[in-house]
Amino acid sequence: ANAKCGTPCPTGRGCPFGQACFLDTICSDWGAGGSTSSSSSSSSSSSSSYTGTIKTFGHAAVEETFQSIRDVINTKLFLYETPDMQWLPSTVYRFDGFFDGLQLMYKQGVNGKKIYMGGNDPDCPHCHMYGLVNIAAFLAQAMKETIRYDACDENSWDRVGDKKMYPIANACGQLGQSYQDYHCKEEERFMECEVDINMSIKAVTHAKWWGAPGPLFCGPKTQYPHTGYWDFSYECNNQWANPPEYCDAYEGQKGGKHIDDAPYANAAGRTDVEGCCWWGRGVIQTSGVCNFGKLNYFLGKRAHDEGRESRYPDIDFCKDPEAICANENYRELKWIAGFFYWVDQVQPYDSEGWVYLDALRKFVENGMEGDAFINSVSGIVNRGCHNPPCGTGALDGGPERAENFFNILKEMTFAWVDVVPP
C-alpha cells in the first residue's frame, strides 16, 4: 500500500504521534483520521497551520496550544454555512468566549466538577494530550450542533404532519420530545426549574435560509390558544396583495409565513406553547427543566439566594433561560452551559463497561487511531448512549462529528509528544 510515510503499523502500540493507522497496515500523516466524510468546512491541509512547539506541560500546555491556534479556530474551525452554501467565520461563537469559558470550567468548575485537562504532573509529559483530546471531542460536537448554524437558540427543524410543515409547537420539543418533562434523577429533582405556564419568551437566533422558520417562542394559552405552523414555501413579499404583504416576521426574512388558522400538532401532539420555554440553548443546546435548574442551582440566582457561591448571582436561569443567548455582559455563557453538560454528563459516563475517561486515555495511548472513540462520544451527546441506537434512534451526523474532531486534532499536532509508559 502507498502512504506518505510508509511505516508499518506497530503491533499493539499504534503509530507515531501526528500519524494514524489506516486499514491496520500503514501509518499515514493526519488526514481524516478514520472519517470518510467530506465537508466544505474541513481543512484541506494534512498538518497543523501552526509550526511552533509547546514549551510548557500540564494545564499550561493545554492553554498554550489553544492560544497558539487562536486565529485558526476563528477562521478555519468555527465556521457556519450560509444560505448560499458558503462557509464563513461564526459571528456567535468566537475564540475569546470559548477560552473564557474553558478557563472558568477547569479552574473553578461547578459543584466540584471541572473540565478534564489531563492533570499537572511534571512526570507525565504527555498528559496534556488527554486534555486536548477531551476538549477536541467537545468542540467536535459543538461544531455540529450549533456553530455550523451560527445559532445559539435551537432552530425549528422538525417537519411533521400531513402538510410536512414546521409546527410552532416545536418549541415544546422536536422528534416527539417534551423538554419541560426532561426531569432530573429522583435524588436531584430538588434542583429542577418549576414550569411557569405564564412564562413568555422569544428566541434571539434562528435559521436564515430562504423560508426558514422564525424564532421559537413560548407563552400561555391565554395568549396563544392554539398554534399552527410555519409555511416555508410562502412568498411573503407581495405588495400587490390586498392588503400588501411583507416579510416582517424577523429581520432578514426572505420567505415563509406563520399560518395560525387551525391547530397544527408537533411530533408529540402539542398544539400550544404553554410552558414550552425550555428549548436548546448554547453551544451544545442545553435543554429541559433539569439542566436549566442545575445551572441556576450551582451558578445562578438560586445559588446566591441560598448562600452558596454564585458566578452569576443576578441571572435566574429558571425565570430567564434565554439569558444564555441574550445576555451581552457574559459572552462565555453560551459556552458555560455546554461545558457544564460535558462535566455533568459526558466526562463521568460509565455504562456497560465503556468508561469515557478510560476510553479517552486509551485513544491517546494507542496513537489516536480510528473513529471508534469519537463515534461513541457522539452517541452519548446525540442519543444518550455510547453505542446507538439505544431507544432514541440512530446517531445523527456521525461522520461530520468525526471529521470535525480530526480536523481539530490535526491543528494541534505540534503539541503531540511520545507517551511515557507508567
Image: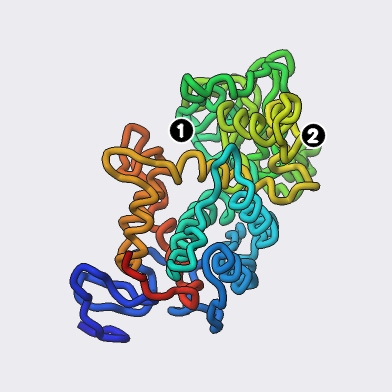
In the rendering, at what x and y percent does residue 411 appear?
Answer: 50, 73
Q: On the image, numbered disc 2 is attached to which residue?
A: 314
Residue ID at (35%, 66%): 368
Q: Quadrant of the N terminus?
A: bottom left
Image position of 38 with respect to 385: above or below: below
In the rendering, at what x and y percent does residue 12 appear?
Answer: 20, 68
Say which quarter of the image contains residue 300: top right
In the rendering, at what x and y percent does residue 418 appear?
Answer: 37, 75
Residue ID at (50%, 53%): 116
Amino acid residing under circle 1: Leu
Callout 1: 10 Å neighbours few (<14), some, many (20+)? some
Q: Quadrant of the C terminus?
A: bottom left
> What is the distance, in whole Å, between disc 1 and disc 2 at their CAs?
34 Å
Q: On the image, numbered disc 1 is attached to which residue?
A: 175
Say which quarter of the image contains residue 321: top right
Residue ID at (36%, 79%): 29
